[in-house]
Amino acid sequence: MSDWPALPIFVRLSGRAVVLVGEGEAADAKRRLLERAGAVIVREDRAGDARLAVVADDEAAAHRLKARGMLVNVVDRPELCDFTLPAIVDRTPMLIAVGTGGVSAGLAAAVRQRLEAILPARLGRLAEALHAARGSLRARFPETPARRRAIGTALAEGGALDPLRDHADADVIARIAAGAPPRVEHVRLRSLDPDDLTLREARWLSQADRVTHRADVPAVVLDRARADAVREQTDAASTPSGDGLTVDVALAEPRA
């Protein structure tokens, strides 16, 4: 796996000073972004205890601020940036940041636009409803593994709370508690290397409540399942039973 160009983080700026240097359209755009995050924007000569700075058009100022120990973003100069500002999909309180480490702001913007079209406008309300339901869900599912499975099942693709659908007014507790009808997905391995799993197969394993497998399925493949998923060695293909998702894993039949 290649190294990341930067570590994505979310920084709380509400009430905190951030230096902004520059004038014009680029500086105005950064000002709006910082103000939306609640930052207190200050000039370089009023930096005080500021730890972050955004510079629109003054390389010398960038070097001065770096010398003072600040982390600096320089607009359109990725080689001078200590941090970059991503394209943002806003579904408050859910925020999705798309960045390229300063390599291509245009590409990040294009991906953001595609995500804007896919994600429901009221996705943030689902996040708030899940937060509000935490106490009730702990009472309904006192065991952490069971609670995690129930929530994961509801939020999975096609689930009762699939996040790519609009559930803003849903009773999330009822939908999570209702669970999902039992189903079985079959994974037929084309090799013993877990990296050869398709994305769909890897997702099934990561979501499985129960994994059935033949004796010759390697442990490195089974390790792609959750640690709390039930594992069962069997010679027969599984049929739906119990609750949730069963994934049946076997080697593919050799070609004639």
Image (cartoon, grey):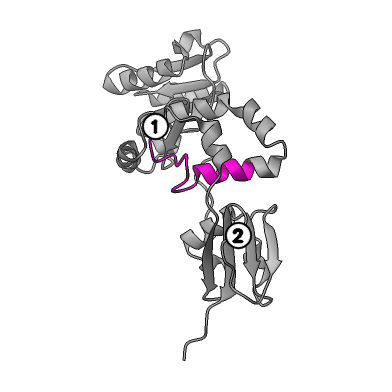
Q: Residues within 10 Å of mark 2 (few under 14, many from 20)?
A: few
| Residue beneath disc 2 | 241
| Highlighted magenta segment, given as a residue range | 148-166
**Sequence-wise first label, 2 or 1:** 1
Look at the numbered disc 2 and give the secondary structure of its residue: loop
Residue 22 located within the stretch drawn in magenta:
no
Q: Quadrant of residue 114?
A: top left
Mark 2 or 1: in front is 2
205 sits left or right of 55 in the view:
right
Question: Could you say which disc has been placed on residue 146 in the image?
Answer: none
Callout 2–callout 1 Cβ contact below 8 Å? no
17 or 210: nearer the viewer: 210
Task: Estimate the spatial distance between the alpha carbons at disc 2 and disc 1, rounded to whole Å.
Answer: 42 Å
Of all residues shown, which one is farthest toward the top?
46
Is residue 156 shown in magenta?
yes
Mark 1 residue crowding within 10 angstroms, few (<14) / some (14–19) / many (20+): some
Identify the mark at residue 88; answer none if there is no mark. 1
- Between residue 247 and residue 19, name the one nearer to us: 247
Displayed quadrant of residue 89: top left
Type of amino acid under label 2: Ser
Label 1 SS = strand
- Amino acid at pointer 1: Ile
Specify the farthest residue to the left.
Answer: 25
The answer to whether residue 72 shows anywhere in this view is: yes
Q: Nearer the viewer, residue 84 or 192?
A: 192
Q: Position of residue 60 (x, y in %)?
A: 42, 24
Q: Is residue 193 visible?
A: no
Q: Position of residue 175 (x, y in %)?
A: 51, 37
